[in-house]
Amino acid sequence: MVAGEASGDLLAGLLLAGMRERWPDLVAEGIGGPKMAAQSFEAWWPSERLAVRGYVEVLRHYRGLKAIRDALGDRLLAERPAAFIGVDAPDFNLGLEARLKAQGLKTIHFICPSIWAWRGGRARKMAASCDHVLCLFPFEPELLHAHGVAATFVGHPLADAIPIEPPRSASRASLGLADDDEVLAILPGSRRSEIERIAPHFLAAAALLHRQRPALRFVLPVAPGLRPLLDPLLAQHARGVPIRLLDGQSHAALAACDATLIASGTATLEAALFKRAMVIGYDMHPLSWQLMKRMRYQPWVGLPNILCRDFVVPELIQGDCRPAPLAAAVVQWLEDEPRRKALERRFTDLHHLLRRDTARRATDAIAQVLDA
């Protein structure tokens, strides 16, 4: 298995739990992180080595990533495992899967790349790379079938893992927050590039909010290894702002908060499953953004908006991702409880749609690939 960055590690860990229940003697190894390690996964390289996003950023790390992919491919072809499962990270995994499939190894991709939002040409590449794709969203298999790619809708494992009714009071108690506190969770991303480009805007927005609403409490979950990167940014952009840093605990922060200021990505879906109002922000290298814009099929960037087919939450991307607009959008959520309640109902419907016992469905599909 190969999972890149924190979100892939989380999804792969949930998948591994279901696989190990079905196959108790499972041996799983490759590239992964702490959630996978908790399921007895042996990581030959850590998942954060793949945590690079954006064309310019990938080019900067291309040589090192290619060396890892080549070495991994050589090892897998020598050891010939029963199957290879690539978890997200399509720029890394699809090329590796194509090499393995051409040599007769079974290849499965977990999480359909967003061909319905970006880079539709990937669907053709997947036909040469994947024996089967495990899809998180119900409309994806039909799109893949049109390109000759076998696929199964398995639901989203986070929809199984996150309760329909978020444990707000218990999470607040665990974080030392009172039930009547007004709480904002700040999630600036889990990649170094995201911390460098997005966290300064989010932290400066928190400083504005602190001046406007001194009683507002802030919690900021920090992904493993990123604390040294974040500390100087706090001193520069949010000095004196009472932001509580958490070691991980993003789910506790989302369950506890009234609203979240959050980087676009898988975390926005987690926030939706916790039924939380959010302001989505994102900022990447300008050249990467220009390239992404040209391949964009839909008006939305954030997963909650894409899945709801509407701007149910604000998106402040690139030039709009600045402290004053971010802070203003947060205040609008905090001051409009009926709007927050309506969003909770919308997200509850989405949660039920995605809750499909993913571990069982996914292992059923994997078993069919292994038996083919």
Image (spheres, rainbow, N blue to C red):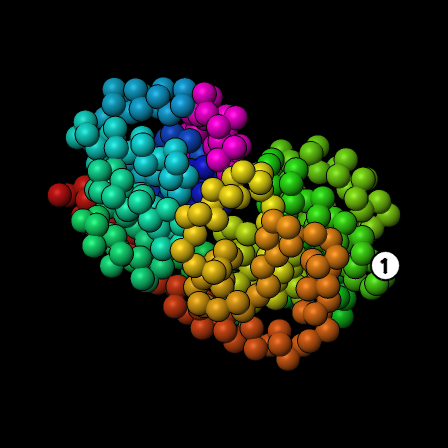
Could you tell whether 323 is left or right of 165 in the image?
right
**How many numbered marks does the figure carry?**
1
Residue 63 placement (x, y as % from top left): 45, 21
The residue drawn where x is 71% and y is 48% is: 201
Quadrant (top left, top right, bottom left, bottom right) of the C terminus: top left
Q: Residue furthest bottom?
A: 338
Quadrant housing residue 88? top left
The residue wearing badge 1 is 211
Quadrant housing residue 357? bottom left
Q: Using the rendered image of the protein, determine whether residue 271 is visible from the camera's viewpoint.
A: yes
The residue drawn where x is 52% and y is 32% is: 56
Residue 37 placement (x, y as % from top left): 46, 36
Label 1: state its secondary structure: helix
Closer to the camera, 227 or 199?
199
The residue drawn where x is 43% and y is 59% is: 298
* Above or below, comparing residue 104 to residue 288 in the picture: above
The residue drawn where x is 21% and y is 33% is: 101
Quadrant housing residue 328? bottom right
Could you tell whether 228 is left or right of 276 in the image?
right
Closer to the camera, 211 or 177?
211
Q: Using the rendered image of the protein, determine whether residue 18 is visible from the camera's viewpoint.
A: no
Closer to the camera, 362 or 122?
122
The span shown in magenta is 39-65
Residue 135 placement (x, y as % from top left): 32, 53
Q: Amino acid at mark 1?
A: Arg
Quadrant (top left, top right, bottom left, bottom right) of the N terminus: top left
Could you tell whether 364 is left or right of 309 in the image?
left
